[in-house]
Amino acid sequence: MSPLYSHVDLRVRDRERAVAFYGPLLEQFGFVLKERAAGDEWPTWRRPGADRNGEFFGFEVDPEHRPNETRIAFSCGSREEVEAVAQIVARHGALNIDGPPGYDDKYYACFFEDPDGNKLEVCYLT
């Protein structure tokens, strides 16, 4: 079966700030920072086992970036994982953290923004 998605190419205003924020978050979900060649300014995180064309997360710098209402949601395997990720992002500069617990007893989630205001979520559905 082919990967569900190819890649996420997220717009940010500051690459190094994005790397510092997203590194711990993506590593929590099993992504690994791809080794960069000299002069390579495009850090990407890949899912282990993904080929060069699939399942990676990277950034495009746009100093004029203005976030919108689009939200990326990461699926967690338990309520405890949602709580662990919420603590990780809080320590690394997340903004406007809301939750957990989420919507109701079947949707346990934490909503937050990255340092550039991009909307994110981690959730566990029972």
Image (spheres, grey):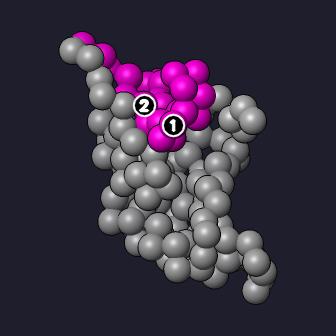
Give residue 57's mark.
none
- Quarter placement of the C terminus: bottom right
Q: Is 99 left, or right, of 30 in this rendering? A: right
Residue 77 in the image: x percent, y percent?
61, 69
Q: Which residue is mark 1?
A: 49
| Tag 2 secondary structure | strand
Residue stretch rendered in magenta on the structure:
39-63
Q: Nearer the viewer, residue 110 or 75?
A: 75
Picture residue at 60% right of the left edge, 51% below the top: 119
Q: CA distance from mark 1 to mark 2?
A: 14 Å
Answer above or below: position of 108 versus 27.
below
Q: Is residue 58 magenta?
A: yes
Q: Which residue is mark 2?
A: 44
Q: Amino acid at mark 2?
A: Thr
Q: Is 55 left, or right, of 43 in this rendering? A: right
Q: Amino acid at mark 1?
A: Gly
Q: Is residue 18 visible?
A: no
Residue 36 in the image: x percent, y percent?
29, 23
Q: Quadrant of residue 33?
A: top left
| Tag 1 secondary structure | loop
Give the mark nearest the N terminus, 1 or 2.
Answer: 2
